[in-house]
Amino acid sequence: MNRRCYGWILPLLLCLMSACDDDKYHYPSVKLEFMTAFAGADGSLRSVLTDEGENLSVVEDRTNTRIDANASARIISNYALERAADGSPGARLYALSQVISGLPRTADKFEEGVKTDPLDVLSIWMGLDYLNMTLEVKEGGKHTLDFVEDEVTADAATGCCDVYLTLYHEVEEKVASYTRRVYASLPLRQYAAEGVRNVTVHLSVHTYSENVKTYNFDYIPE
């Protein structure tokens, strides 16, 4: 569930912006953000945690998304802030897409080896316990993305940890027809072992220019 991502947020957002000419109609103030969604016993989304650390009750989920019961998932969503029935902060979800967010695995866990077909990184930034990415791939078939854990080194004396990773990308068809965006969030909480005060993430990505770009970020566990 976490290994693929399909973008369809923009068309719905355009509909929200252009549906009505009535001067009395007030368009909702919609945000587009990465967040973590939490489900209830029936798999429906009950709450979300923003990357600013704000917990919001789901007032309404217009996408009617279902995930595993009592589970969580990374999503990117168009949402508006609203008050829940009890007066607490809430969110109305207008559109969402699940985000690739699997835990990194070592190279030996990939039966057919580590694939590094090229892609481009449009943006990359730190979120709450995650490294978020907006990626661009050339559409030509099924895309599989994952995170490969190359090496982890820790210094108990300083409380610093260095994590070296590679972005896994496999394309079944090599003939590309057009480009599209996909979204990924690299989870980092698992590296916040006892005594670790700073995690430096080194993520290597193979790009269309045939260069390997390495992105370096500091993650400070709360």
Image: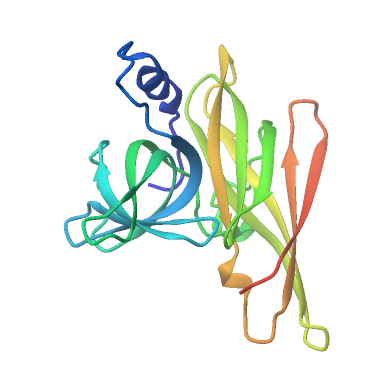
Compare residues 164 and 40 and report the one nearer the observer: 40
- The coloring applied to the image is rainbow
Which residue sits furthest left?
A: 42
Q: Which residue is drawn at 65% across and 46% down?
A: 167
| Residue plotted at (36% across, 18% down) | 15
- From what the image shows, is residue 158 above or below residue 126? below
When asked about the image quadrant of residue 79, the answer is top left
The answer to whether residue 65 is left or right of residue 109 is left
Residue 195 in the image, given as x and y percentages of width and height: 69, 86
Q: In which quarter of the image is the C terminus?
A: bottom right
Q: Residue 109, how many percent across, how many down? A: 55, 59
Pick the front one: 204 or 125: 125
Height in image: 5 above or below 17?
Answer: below
Q: In this view, does 102 lie to the left or right of 136?
A: left
- Is 210 placed above or below 198 here? above
- Tell me which corner region of the image, top left, top right, bottom left or bottom right, holds residue 126: bottom right
Residue at left 50%, top 43%? 33
Question: Left of 108 or right of it: where is 50?
Answer: left
Q: What residue is drawn where x is 29% and y is 51%?
A: 58
Position above or below: 119 against 100: above
Asked where in the image residue 218 lies, by quadrant, the reply is bottom right
